[in-house]
Amino acid sequence: MSNILLGLQTVASVNVLLFLVVGCVVGLVIGALPGLTGNMAIALMVPMTFGMEPSVGLAFLAAIYCSSIYGGSISAILLGIPGTISSFATTLDGYPLAKKGKAGLALGTSTMASVFGGLFSAIVLMFLTPVLAEVALKFGPGEYFAVSLLGIACITSISGDNIPKGLLSGMIGLLIAVIGMDPQNGYPRLTFGNMNLLSGIGLVPSLIGLFGVVSVLKTAEACKRVKTNNTMPEVDNVWIGWKECFRQLPTWIRGSVIGTIVGIIPGAGTNVATFMAYDMEKKMSKDPDSFGKGNVIGVAAPESANNAVTGGSLVPLLALGVPGNSTSALFLGAIMIHGMRTGPVFFTEHPDVIYGLFIAIIIANIIMAPLGIFILRYMKTILSVPEELLAGIILAFCVTGVFAIATNPFDVLVLIIFGLIGYFCYKFKIPTAPMIVAMVLGSMTENNLRQALVASKGSWDFLYKQPITLTVLIIAVGSFFFPFIAAKVKKMKAAKAK
């Protein structure tokens, strides 16, 4: 309880509250604009947090994260184009509702469901993460090696439909992770005599390149195409009323539980949560045929689930120091900029920062409700901003933000190179999420493995002598091969259906 009060004290300042509001606005607008993602927004803003207090910077990023997920539903409902990948399921019923003249009902449902899901996962994050961190205090290098390996094993789950390309992306990420000095003997690896590479590839410049620069290149490519003008429906009153809120409450609870659990599982992602929640409500409905034709529950279910993923996805990062997806990897970069480490030590060394983050996520979700309702009035103006103008602003943020961190021109070069790598992956449909996870966890896995081998005097018996290590390794192996098995079963079912 004392730590929660400490977190409240940390957040209870005009500076933090102001950045929470600004973060919500930035995330909401960027999430609503098709083609721009919350990850890109976070990547762009990470360098800006360098000059802030850690509690302020992390609160700012948390607000962007939460509101960008919700913002994706706005264009999904009004244009039939999901602003973020996580809002794809929302288009199934949100857009038909808007075409029926019920855009206000759909947007209001999205707002309230998103706020509920975000608050639910934030409370779980606050009370579950410290428990996991206490357990992790008993971990040694062997256990942390197994946990890191579990994170890397999830690259098959986040590879999408093409697992071989996902594995290729992960291998590239691991190769990038070994660049720099050997952690044991200090011998330079893959530096090619360049002094700038001795400390490895900078995480922030590479992530901004993969998200920000790629977004600009995609926009430049899209500007050459013939544009189609989608007429947005008029938005009436977006407040759905308390009676409708109570009617949808069971759906919000089920979606929030699914989203939080899926978020905690490394590599699962928001798409899994949204479609699981949508499918559950459709199966439980007395009128399943109405789904896909404008059923408001078809909006409430995925929106509560995808916002519940936000808090859940930060649990493994903050408790164990293992980012389970690209968003938590961005948060890890922000935490590292301020010279802090995630995991159990975070709770002992910086309780004010971490509990301040918990409270900030709760407040950000509360701010989303009135802010979203207010901004919805101006969505026609926001969604009509020229893509060319947005691309120029984003590129300027990318370059200045990366250079400002260490005032090193080499970081700008890293930004450009990773932007080209990301665009190459986009053109050849190679997922970049496995690469990001491998880049972040590669050095962590190597360090813990080598420390474990030193402690065991070169013996590999630590892999099976420690029950926790063995259990996590078994889960990691299962996690790695599960997508292959699932794909095989799906093909067998399809063959039988024919």
Image (cartoon, rainbow, N blue to C red):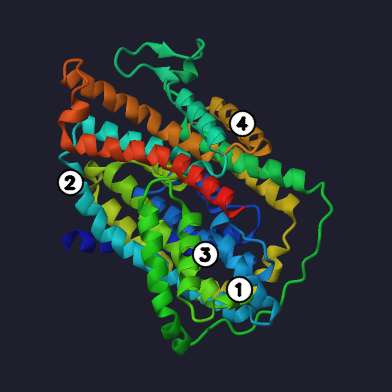
Mark 1 or 2: in front is 2
Q: Give the CA separation, mark 1 to mark 3.
A: 12 Å
The vertical placement of 332 against 257, above or below, is: above
- Determine which residue is flagged by label 4: 421
Please identify the quadrant where the N terminus is shown. Answer: bottom left
Find the residue positioned furthest to the bottom.
243
Please tell me which of labels 2 and 4 falls first in the chain.
2
Disc 4 + disc 1, Cβ < 8 Å = no
Badge 4 marks a residue whose secondary structure is helix
- The residue sitting at 39% across, 36% down in the picture is 153
- Say few, some or many: other residues with alpha carbon within 10 Å of mark 3 (under 14 / 14 to 19 / 20 or more): many
Q: Quadrant of residue 28?
A: bottom right
Residue 29: x percent and y percent? 59, 62
As drawn, the label of residue 135 is: 2
Mark 1 and 2 residues: CB-CB less than 8 Å, in contact? Answer: no
Residue corresponding to mark 3: 70
What is the CA distance from the residue labelled 2 to the residue labelled 4? 39 Å
Q: Amino acid at mark 2?
A: Val
Q: Earlier in the sequence, mark 3 or mark 4?
A: 3
Q: Which mark is residue 376?
A: 1
